[in-house]
Structures are given as structure tokens and as C-alpha cells.
Amino acid sequence: MKFSKLFSQSMFLAIMILLHIVPANADYIVDTGPGLNERGGSALYNTTPVNGDFQFLAVEFFLDRTYTLTDLEGWIYHEDPQNQSSHINFIIYGDGGNIPDVNNELYNQIVTVSSYFAPQWHGLTGLNWTLSSGEYWLAFEVRQPELLGNAMPPGAPNPQPNSAYYNGGNLDVGYLPESLGYGVRIQGTVVSEQVSIDIKPGSFPNSINLKSKGNVPVAILSSPTFDASTVDWGTVEFAGAPALSIGGSPEDVNSDGLLDLVLHFSTQSLNLTSGDTEACLTGKTLSGQEFKGCDSVNIVK
């Protein structure tokens, strides 16, 4: 995503805006609730460590936009009376067509399971695992050198519709339907897409007189990975002000061969102060993908 303002005298390069994660509280992407508070369910063992075989239970989940996963939990207990804890891998796999693609391991981290024959929520927090929109699988997996068993009771009140079981050789979808309903919780934050903007296209510095009763044009720039024509006008705000119902015709603002979108915002509605040197625009595309971009401003007193 590159955009530059060229000026014959100063040859200033305007700020190129790269999107970042919009600060937000984590949302529950999946929350099945806990399984039964009792022993039973599906056990997981590393059955034949010599051959590297392993077992996992997995649940499918769908993302309608880019997320950073922050917390993963499973309703699990361990079955080894000789040890105070066991270990299990939490793994994110890509989708292999309604089954986990075990050759597409995206993230993997080990979790200690401390509850013996008494299921509890065990998992990971503070993660920074980013996934784009699509279908994925969260697997609870026993791997070498761990040989001990863990188990996940069924009975979660809001189970995921698609689950899978892997025993080191056979992958079954909807394995033992009467035993499905594993307790799973997945949390994450929406990630904004990268976008560049140009405040007051064709001018520099981008001077704004907050006493003006006019409006400020802002160009949302298309790139090879972002189409400005997909912007949902009703979601766009610039410095806290909503877009006015004027303009909006596609035009190639920066002469890169891509059509951009220029929206206008009431100067009197901008949440800016005399000390501000940057202003940001936020919004969503028609598919719900969030985006954000910022550019420099020069506040005229």
C-alpha cells in the first residue's frame, strides 16, 4: 500500500498509513459453555509414541473477518493418578474441507492440565494469534513425549456443529455423535485492515481551520489488497465526524490506476484541537471488515 504526495518545491512525501489493531475488548467467538461436571467423555492418549501417532479432538469455528485470538479454553481433566498434572497441545489447524487439515498447522502451544478426574477450564490467555476470515479448527491434542491421558466430557449446552476425532491414522467427522458437545471457549479482537488515506487531496500541509463552517474532503485510497468502492459510507467517521451525504464518486486521486473514494466531513463536527498533528478515519466495508487510516493535519488557529 503505497501513496505519496509529490510537491515540486519541497518533494515532501506524505505519510503512508498502515493499519493497526483497533484497541478493543476481546469478544467471544465461540462459547459452548462447560461440559458435564463428571468423569467420562472422550479420552486422549499418545497411543503409539514409537511411530509418532497421537490423538486429538477438534471443533470447527468460522471467522467472518480478521481476528487476533487472545484466549483459548477447553473443559478438560487428566486421568493419571501418579502425577499432579499432564500436558495437552492447543493447536489451530486450517480447514481441509470439513475436516482439519493436519498438514496446515497454524499455531501450537502446550497447556498444563492440573485437574485430576475433575473437569475445569484449562487454556491459554494473552495470545496474539492472528487469523484472516475463513474456517479453522481448534484441536486438543496429546503429542510426544506426553503419554498420559486427558479427557473432555460432553454435554456443553451450546456445542459447535462440527467436531472431529483423530487417532493417529483415521480422521472422523462427527465422531460418536452422542459424545460430542465438548466445552470450548475462544476469544479474540477484530483486526482492522490496512488502508491509506489522504486528507485534503492535492494540498500540503493539510491545514484545517476549526472555525470554518465548510467541510474537509478525505480520500480513502484503494490498493492491490483494498477496494475503496466496498466502503460502507454509513460506518465511516473522520476525527469523530460522520460522512456527509455529498461526493463519493469514484476517482483516481493518486494516479495509480485504482479508483479511490473521497468523502466529506463537516469541519464543525471534527473532534480536533489546536495541538493535534494527526487525524484518523475509521469505518467498515460492506462485508463488515473494519479499517482505519491516519494522516497528518495542520490546525490553523
Image (cartoon, grey):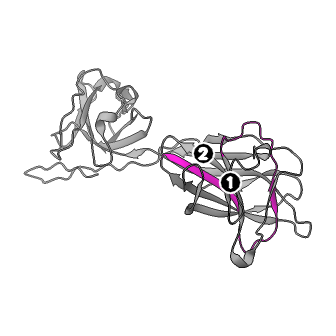
Q: Residues within 10 Å of mark 2 (few under 14, many from 20)?
A: some
Marks 1 and 2, how far apart at CA: 17 Å
Instruction: Estimate how packed mark 1 is, as few (under 14), some (14 to 19) or many (20 or more) residues with alpha carbons within 10 Å.
Output: some
Q: Residue at x 50, y 46 (%)?
A: 134
Q: Residue at horizontal 82%, vertical 68%?
A: 148
Q: Quadrant of the C terminus?
A: top left
State the residue position of label 1.
Answer: 172
Stretch in magenta: 133-162
Q: Is residue 164 left or right of residue 228?
A: right
Mark number for residue 272?
A: none
Task: Indicate yes or no whether the magenta region holds residue 153.
Answer: yes
Residue under pointer 2: 61
Residue 209 on image: x %, y %: 24, 30
For label 2, the SS is strand
Give the dominant element type of the magenta stretch: helix, strand or loop: loop
Q: Nearer the viewer, mark 1 or mark 2?
A: 1
Q: Earlier in the sequence, mark 1 or mark 2?
A: 2
User: Along the line of sight, which residue is nearer the eye, 272 or 295?
Assistant: 295
Q: Is residue 128 visible?
A: no
